[in-house]
Image (spheres, grey):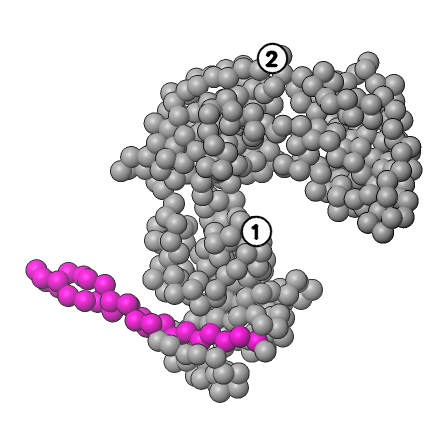
Amino acid sequence: MLENEAKSSTGAEVPAPWLFLIGLGEDGPTGLSAEARAALAEAEIVFGGDRHVALVQGTVPGELRPWPQPFRNALPQILAERGRKVCVLATSDPFHYGIGNSLSRAIPAEEMRIIPQISSFDMACTRMRWPQEECALVSLHGRTLYRIVPHLQPGARILALSWDETTPRAVAELLTARGLGQSHLVVMESLGGPEERVRETQASAFALDGIVPLNLIAVEVVATRDSRILPLTPGLDEEWFAHDGQITKSEIRAITISALAPRGSELLWDVGAGSGSVAVEWCQRHMHNRAVAFEARADRAERIARNKLELGGLNVTVVGAAPAGFVAREAPDAVFIGGGLTEKGLFEAAWAALKPGGRLVANVVTIEGEAKLAELHAQHGGSLRRISIDRLAPVGGKHGWRPAMPVTQWRVEKP
């Protein structure tokens, strides 16, 4: 079978694939298709995790090679066997939080045959009777628990791959701490295998024990008026962030995010980041957005790290002072300067790094900052606006409007 050749779109003969990527379920070889079983029978080398190797032990004639440690060494070892008959075992669907993406980037399509199985997400949906298109699918394997936070919305249905046997309890405790203790949890272990087990509980009453490392959690979120639900709008209230007062206020931040106009998979530089609130909200707009927060003070950098974690495990990298920190970094799609605009050379370095067509937004509150913006506006164009916010405050026994410091904002696109 492996020696068969196929024809390309031009009609030319192309070699048969040397690598078979096979999705393996908890039922082991018995659940494999005839094609997958034939590939394993002819394979000279079979790569896979310890669990995969144990499932096929004694059923394949080829050499079994468990993944090396660290795992990053696996791909070079696979590529070193190019031309031999090789199988790679993955869990169920290799392209759903699996190794398939890494292999497909390194190996031409014509050299690899992929034989997937039904994924654990698919199986979980059938157990729960949930339409998959209505569920949030999350992997907590090798990732922070807080990645589940943005999905904790009233009535949400979430399927989360666990890191290990401790994850279900950790999720239950997180839900309870956020006032979502009435949420319904279903822990599904060893899905699709002979040892499959499905157990249900309420988050606040979690008492399941003996959980196996290979498990998936289904969460049906039940919210009350006291639940801590992350709003979906930009301009989060300041109380969501750890800060020392150095934070772009919520109303100004909402306008700033609008001015930055984030799009999917874009990179922001947040210069003079303070609490990192703009970087955090930039990344909340799209799951593939990234930000670099430039903050010189170590205590504020620590707060940024805490905020990016607790508000969703977001892709915010915290570095030191600007403009020194700009050197050798990936060019940004957008730049926000919330502090330090008047520092010599800062704007020029940021502007030089910004991609053509990128957006730069700067906020200032001082006369010196406004003078700098006027100068830059004269040189580069763009738009200027002043933003004023008044808040109701007590005045003796009555109330009146107390103005916050007005913010002058400049927005410009790089030619």
**Residue farthest along the front direction in this orientation:** 11
Q: Earlier in the sequence, mark 1 or mark 2?
A: 2
* 318 lies above or below 46: below
* Viewer can see residue 295: no
Q: Residue at x 35, y 31 (%)?
A: 222
Please tell me which residue lies in front, 48 or 273.
48
Q: Which residue is mark 1?
A: 288
Q: Secondary structure at mark 1?
A: loop
Query: Is residue 97 found left or right of 186 in the rendered image?
Result: right
Percent position of residue 279, x then y = 49, 57
Percent position of residue 66, x then y = 79, 26
Q: Quadrant of the N terminus?
A: top right
Percent position of residue 165, x then y = 56, 23
Q: Amino acid at mark 2?
A: Glu
**Disc number for residue 62:** none
Residue 201: image quadrant is top left
Q: Which residue is mark 2?
A: 195
Please tell me which residue lies in front, 337 or 380.
380
* 340 lies above or below 253: below
Q: Magenta stretch?
A: 387-414
Q: Residue at x 53, y 83 (%)?
A: 380
Magenta stretch: includes residue 176: no
> Main SS of the magenta segment?
strand
Query: Is residue 328 found left or right of 159 in the rendered image?
Result: right
Please tell me which residue lies in front, 15 or 27.
15
Residue 102: image quadrant is top right
Q: Amino acid at mark 1?
A: His
* 58 lies above or below 409: above
Q: Residue at x 81, y 15 (%)?
A: 59
Residue 403: image quadrant is bottom left
Task: Say few, some or many: other residues with alpha carbon within 10 Å of mark 1 (under 14 / 14 to 19 / 20 or more).
Answer: some
Q: Residue at x 35, y 59 (%)?
A: 250
